[in-house]
Image (cartoon, rainbow, N blue to C red):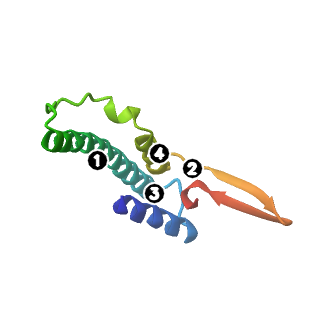
Amino acid sequence: SLFGTFLACLQHELVVMEYDPRSQAMDMLKALCLLSTIITLLVTYRLYILSELFERLVAHLTQLMTLDEHIPLYHPLSNSDFWMEVLIILPVCPPFFTAEIGIINWDNFVLYRIETV
């Protein structure tokens, strides 16, 4: 979501300004970002259920098929597009976790923090 993206950018800027990634404020931002991610996943799940219901409604109105309003809760889980969206939405830095990854790039040592990636 846009709110989660804003929170992630705020985390990044705080780390760049040498703010401690293990601080309570940073963990609060990470928790809000995680909550935003969970809400976005739930809204996406609901969207796929409503999309299936809409397709059934269109078939009912245009082809006079019987309208079955019951959509199993596992229905979106069988859709590969749903899983692609989940893979795009899901990566988030959880609260109380920080990590660093160092690599050598053209004789330069580059250090990445998980909050800035």
Spatial separation of the CA atoms under disc 1 and disc 4: 15 Å
Mark carried by residue 43: 1
Instruction: Name the outermost residue toward the right.
Output: 107
- Res 84 label: 4
Q: CA distance from mark 3 to mark 1?
A: 26 Å
Q: Nearer the viewer, mark 1 or mark 4?
A: 4
Residue 37 at least partly seen:
yes
Query: Which amino acid does the dot numbered 1 rest on?
Result: Val
Mark found first going from the N terminus, 4 or 2: 4
Given residues 50 and 113, the one toward you in this image is 50
Quarter of the image that includes the N terminus:
bottom left
**What residue is drawn where x is 17% and y is 40%?**
63
Residue 36 placement (x, y as % from top left): 34, 52
The mark lying in front, picked from 1 and 2, is 1
Amino acid at circle 2: Thr
Q: Is residue 39 above or below residue 10?
A: above
Q: Give, as a three-letter code, the residue at label 3.
A: Met
- Does the image show residue 95? no
Point 21% across, 38% down: residue: 56
Residue drawn 45% across and 57% down? 26
Depth check: 96 or 116 in front? 116
Q: CA distance from mark 2 to mark 3?
A: 10 Å
Tag nearer the camera, 3 or 1: 1
Identify the residue position indicated by label 3 in the image: 26
Q: Position of residue 62 (x, y in %)?
A: 16, 44
Q: Residues within 10 Å of mark 3 (few under 14, many from 20)?
A: many
How far, Cα to Cα, is label 4 from label 2? 26 Å
Q: Which residue is mark 2?
A: 98
Considering only order in the chain, which callout, 3 or 4, is on the residue closer to the N terminus?
Answer: 3
Check disc 4: other Cα within 10 Å, few if <14, some if 14-19, many if 20+: few
Q: Position of residue 111 (x, y in %)?
A: 70, 60
Q: Secondary structure at mark 2?
A: loop
